[in-house]
Amino acid sequence: MKKEKKEKLVIAGPCALESKQQLREVALMLKALGVNHIRASLWKPRTSPGWEGTGAIGLSTLLEETLAYGLVPASEILSAEHAQLAVQALQRYGEEQAKMVLWLGARNQNHLEQKKIAKILASGPKAVLLMFKNPMWEDERHWMGIAEHLYSAGFPMERLMVCHRGFYPGKQANPIGLRNLPDFEMAMRVKAKSGLPMLLDPSHIGGSSQNVISICQEASQYDFDGYMVEVHTNPSVAKTDAKQQLTLAEFEQVLKIIREEAVLETTTKCSMQQMAF
């Protein structure tokens, strides 16, 4: 029996857009590895005052350096204003080419703003997907509530995804120094209850390149539909989250784990089907 891989969505790229050259280099390297969704944030919420990203002026660069090469851009939006800017910029490309993944981060927990964003994106290009991350605190009901707010604002379920990026550790035991603590079981429950694809963000869980790789290995035991991983051509000079961004060589290790997981899942399903007959 021919075994087909269960495709995992892989979104990879720098934490933040820093320059046109930086984005072009990493995007073309990732494309050569078979990764077609390129992440780069424009607006950066910061724990302490610091560089906050290129902002709106980087939006045209992000679209130009991805869509022109047949790649799909991905970025975080923080407000309805950002959503409107993204929709307007994408409309210049026409319905067929206007593809993008936008996401609501863990800090974005204002349901009024979430609904405004959902309404704007629902009326925009049909190939725009919206992903939302879990809140920073561990609350399954609140996490599910985000999906309900987005539905109620008219955003179509078939264009919605969820992402697990771990929870703030607080006073919990954290022996290996993860940036955020994963709850894979909760993520699987939210996936089952919502009926939505569930991605994993190992970068914000791991907090360091070695931890990111380890988290991907652990997560391979669960049914995640994809991964979003921070990758930089030179993490040591990255303006944000330098420790958790992977080099291209490190990312290739992660990609191998993800792709082996896809083959394993398919092999297991084929074996079960054979047993059934």
Image (tube, grey):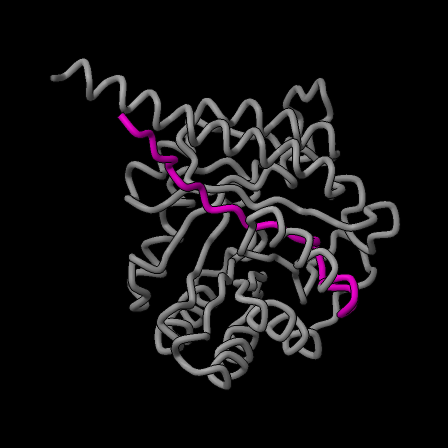
Residue 189 lies, in percent from the top left, at 35, 32
Spot the residue most to the top: 275
User: Can you say whether 105 is above or below 218 in the image?
Assistant: below
**Between residues 263 and 93, which one lies in front from this camera angle?**
263
* Front-lying residue, 96 or 49: 96
The single residue placed furthest to the left in the displayed view is: 277
Where does the N terminus fall, quadrant-wise? top left
Left or right of residue 121, residue 273 in this image = left
Residue at 47% x, 28% y is: 261
For this rendering, which residue is in front, 36 or 45? 36
Above or below residue 100? Residue 139 is above
User: Residue 178: which quarter of the image?
Assistant: top right
Residue shown at 51%/62% (left/top)? 102
Q: Is residue 17 magenta?
A: yes
Kindly identify the residue that appears in the image at 36 percent across and 50 percent down. Answer: 145
Asked if the magenta segment contains residue 198, the reply would be no
Q: Please count the marks in the image.
A: 0
Picture coordinates of residue 237, whole percent (x, y):
88, 51
* Left or right of residue 243, residue 88 in this image: left
- Which SS type dominates the magenta stretch? loop
**Residue 128 drawn above or below residue 264:** below
Residue 65 placement, left or right of 259: right
Residue that protrudes farthest toward the bottom in the picture: 92
In the rendered view, would you say 204 is above or below 176? below
Query: Residue lying furthest right in this view?
Result: 237
Residue 188 picture location, percent across and down: 38, 32
Q: Which quadrant would the C terminus be assigned to in this image?
A: top left
- At 30% from the left and 29% from the top, the residue drawn is 2
Q: Is residue 53 left or right of residue 190?
A: right
Residues rendered magenta in the picture: 1-23
Q: Residue 54 location in percent, x, y? A: 74, 71
